Image (cartoon, helix red, strand yellow):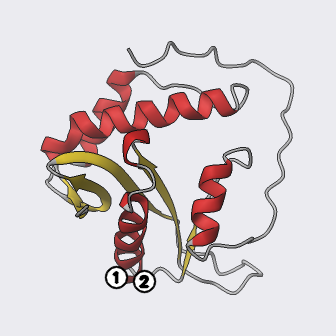
């Protein structure tokens, strides 16, 4: 199967919305206390704004036989401040989504390779995959692609008002 990766453009918005909502639903099943399904119109507006000036090389799509099968988003982190004690390195996060029907066919690997190339072109030295630990498939995917531990992220939920979950993408 041939996988074509390319920068996303305005015509990709409907497919990007489907991918984002599908990914959100998957994450809610894994951890409903930590994840939510965003409002579909909010997701659409985000991608429309992001792509309003044309293709965006930090937002990639993968196609197989003319069908959008996945997406990758490279999120550049701010330049490290001068007061930071860590060695300053340009970092970015990568997020990939592949339709269930296209998993295991090389779509994720093609997207990740394209994302790495894009990140390198932007001067990124460290690419991070922030993965929800119970998402074993994603942990395995990124580990097999050479990602490894990079610190430990600890969290504590503080008391206070909570956002009400939004209804799932229809």
- 33 sits left or right of 142 in the view: right
For residue 89, which quarter of the picture? bottom right
| Labels 2 and 1 touching (C-beta < 8 A) | yes
Left or right, 27 with reference to 157: left
* Quarter occupied by the C terminus: top left
Q: Which residue corresponds to mark 1?
A: 121
At which x and y percent is residue 58? 33, 62
Measuring 37% from the left and 38% from the top, which residue is drawn there? 19
- Where is 121 relative to 23, above or below? below
Q: Residue furthest bottom?
A: 87
Q: Is residue 30 left or right of residue 114?
A: right
State the image coordinates of residue 121 (x, y, percent, origin top left). Answer: 34, 82
User: Toward the viewer: 24 or 40?
Assistant: 24
Q: Residue 140's spot in the image, x, y percent?
A: 64, 60
The residue labelled by disc 2 is 123
Residue lying farthest to the front in this orientation: 1
Query: Is there any visible trace of residue 64 in the rendered image?
Result: yes
User: Looking at the picture, does residue 140 appear above or below residue 22?
Assistant: below
Q: Secondary structure at mark 1?
A: helix
At 41% across and 19% down in the image, what residue appears?
169
The residue drawn where x is 39% and y is 56% is 72
Label 2 and label 1: CA atoms lie apart by 5 Å
Residue that appears at 36% across and 67% down: 110
Q: Is residue 80 left or right of residue 133?
A: left
Q: Nearer the viewer, residue 166 or 84?
A: 166
Above-or-below relation of 30 to 83: above
Q: Secondary structure at mark 2?
A: loop
């Amino acid at each position: 199967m041939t996988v074509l990766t390319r920068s996303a453009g305005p015509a990709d918005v409907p497919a990007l919305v489907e991918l984002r909502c599908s990914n959100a639903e998957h994450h809610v099943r894994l951890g409903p206390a930590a994840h939510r399904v965003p409002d579909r119109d909010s997701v659409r507006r985000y991608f429309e704004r992001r792509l309003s000036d044309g293709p965006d090389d930090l937002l990639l799509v993968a196609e197989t036989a003319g069908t959008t099968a996945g997406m990758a988003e490279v999120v550049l982190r701010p330049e490290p401040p001068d007061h930071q004690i860590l060695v300053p390195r340009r970092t970015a996060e990568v997020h990939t989504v592949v339709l269930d029907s296209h998993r295991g066919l090389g779509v994720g690997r093609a997207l990740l390779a394209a994302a790495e190339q894009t990140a390198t072109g932007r001067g990124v030295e460290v690419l991070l995959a922030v993965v929800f630990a119970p998402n074993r498939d994603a942990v395995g995917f990124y580990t097999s692609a050479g990602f490894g531990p990079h610190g430990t992220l600890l969290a504590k939920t503080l008391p206070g008002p909570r956002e009400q979950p939004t209804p799932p993408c229809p």
